[in-house]
Amino acid sequence: MPFVRLKQSPEGLWPAEGWKGPSRSASWREVPKPSKPSQKDVLWDTWYERFLKVEPNSRGQRIVAQGFVTPDGARLGTWQHAQRRAYRRGSLDAKRRQRLDEAGIVWDPYEAAWEQGFSCYEDFPAELLSGKRIVSSAYITPGGYRLGKWQENQRQARRRGELSATRIARLEAAGIVWSAQDAAWWGAFERFRNFPADANGDRLVPQHYATDDGFKLGHWQHVQRQMWRSGKLNDERAAQLESVGMVWQSTEALWHIGLKRFAEFSPDADGRRNVPRNFVCEDGYKLGSWQVSDRNLAERRASLYPTTSPLYPLEAPSPTS
């Protein structure tokens, strides 16, 4: 194989006789230099960086309120509005549009408004047991968003058939209660669930008991029992109530209340609880009367206390006790 002498050239290794050097048209001075970004591009990039600092929602969308102003005084909501307007007019640069798409902008302001409300709705705490989100109609978030009004708008839109199937599914997955009456029931149910249960896990609310906010929980419990006896309480609600310790029969519930007070009564030296016939608890409960009436329920007493039990005396107390 004949030896070929090579010579180093700017383009690589070439046969010495085949390379004549770079032409003037290929001079290194003619390599194009990158152009500097314009002042407008730099300014747009600054706004874009501010937009990226907005926390995205669960779907990766960044939604800025119309009047939102950043801590450094930049009207980011106004800038976002300008990008949407340019997008609708077709005057938004393709690269800028792509970058905004990747950042999670929502081009439709109506969709953005709905997503903002839904994001606030997801942030509202759901009830622990039912998973329902019960928002009062007048509720306003700490950030000033009227979430109660937004929820009511969704209910009305659904009744009018104006709410899309996708939004209905998302709201139901988030725990919305479509009927205001249903929402009231679930709110009462949470109050019932928060009422202390006894040692058996039963929740026995006194007939006239009211919560700190004035809700008549004892009366509500009574209404649920009446509906259950008449067959008007639906299976879901009955199951929910049973799961948290509802006692359906009021007579049985009253007996359990008495038993709880009886267990709190101090026993004597022999470990027996012999309540005086006229004894009344500090809160007005007539424990002595309960004990006397309970002695007539032989089957119930025998099922809970064997005759050898020292807790419950079988003989009636003397009139002077």
Image (cartoon, helix red, strand yellow):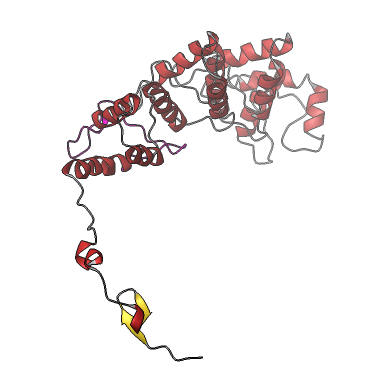
Q: Position of residue 207 (x, y in %)?
A: 58, 15
Residue 167 in the magenta stretch? The answer is no
Magenta highlight on residue 63: yes
Percent x, y of residue 99? 36, 42
Left or right of 16: which side holds 122? right
Q: Position of residue 20 (x, y in %)?
A: 29, 76
Q: Is residue 157 left or right of residue 269?
A: left
The quadrant holding residue 152 is: top left
Depth check: give the residue in front, 124 or 86.
86
Instruction: Depth check: give the residue in front, 167 or 197.
Output: 167
- Asked if residue 321 can be seen in this view, the reply is no
Give whichever of 60, 12 is nearer the camera: 12
Q: Quadrant of residue 206?
A: top right
- Is residue 138 visible from the viewing direction of this image? yes
- Residue depicted at 67% across the width and 14% down the height: 225
* Image height of 214 relative to 123, above or below: above
For the C terminus, give its image quadrant. Answer: top right
